[in-house]
Image (spheres, rainbow, N blue to C red):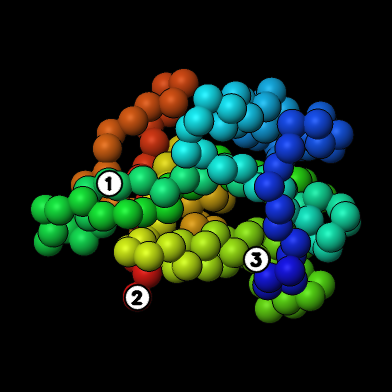
Amino acid sequence: MVRGIFVELAVPDDSFLDLFCSGHERVDHYFRSRAWFAEQSKGGSLTTYVVRVSEGGPVVGYSAVSFRNQPHPDDASISKAKVLVISMLGVDQAFQEQLNALAPDQTYAASIMADLEERARSKASCVGLSLWVRSTNDRAICFYKKVGFVADPAGPSQRDDGDPMLTMRKFLT
């Protein structure tokens, strides 16, 4: 258990997946449909975690991440660097904005982000974390900024169902 949460690899027969509700249709569909498992089964680099309040306890959420070589997040660099890319993250509505009972200085969502940052720090040569968020999702953008992410002005221009996507990054120092 790290930062007051218990994190383990997600498995496709997790019965809570069918009940998972983050309040965001695309996120819920991604985890419920087990799309992440299909990619893992094909040898993809994506790893999906289930986050619980304790071992065997209630599910707080899910995250799907991978380490990738991307353009270095330092705008002054032209090289590539290893980055932990957060492909999908969802916190069940029952735990959104709730303080973590075992880490009362942070919400469960912040505890998940702290765990992902620790995973990035434990990987040799990893320089940061990266994610995409809909530019219209002010609540998520505010949260990511609160945990140290900044908008990546050089980030790729993407659209998701018509919504522009904002690339955000966090350097590891």
Left-right relation of 142 to 127 = right
Name the residue that disc number 2 marks: 173
Q: Is residue 110 above or below residue 62?
A: below
Instruction: Name the spot of residue 173 as percent of width and height, x first.
Output: 35, 75
Side of 56 relative to 162 (left or right): right
User: On the rendered image, what quadrant is the N terminus found in?
Assistant: bottom right
Above-or-below relation of 163 to 78 = above
Q: Residue at horizontal 36%, vertical 54%?
A: 83
Ranked by sequence position, the earlier of labels 3 and 2 is 3
Under circle 3, the secondary element is helix
The kind of residue tagged 3 is: Ser
Query: Which tag, 3 or 1, sits closer to the chain's start?
Result: 1
**Disc with the residue nearer the chain's start (2 vs 1):** 1
Viewer-nearest residue: 7 or 135: 7
Q: Residue at x 68, y 78 (%)?
A: 105
Q: Position of residue 93 (x, y in %)?
A: 77, 46
- The residues tagged by marks 3 and 1 sit, at their Cα atoms, a distance apart of 25 Å
**Residue neighbourhood size for the residue with mark 1, other residues' Cα within 10 Å, grouped as few (<14), some (14–19), many (≥20):** some
User: Mark 1: which amino acid?
Assistant: Gln
74 or 153: which is nearer to us? Answer: 74
Give the Cα separation between the discs numbered 3 and 2.
19 Å
Which of the numbered marks, if any, corresponds to residue 70?
Answer: 1
Tag 2 secondary structure: loop
In the picture, the disc for residue 111 is: 3
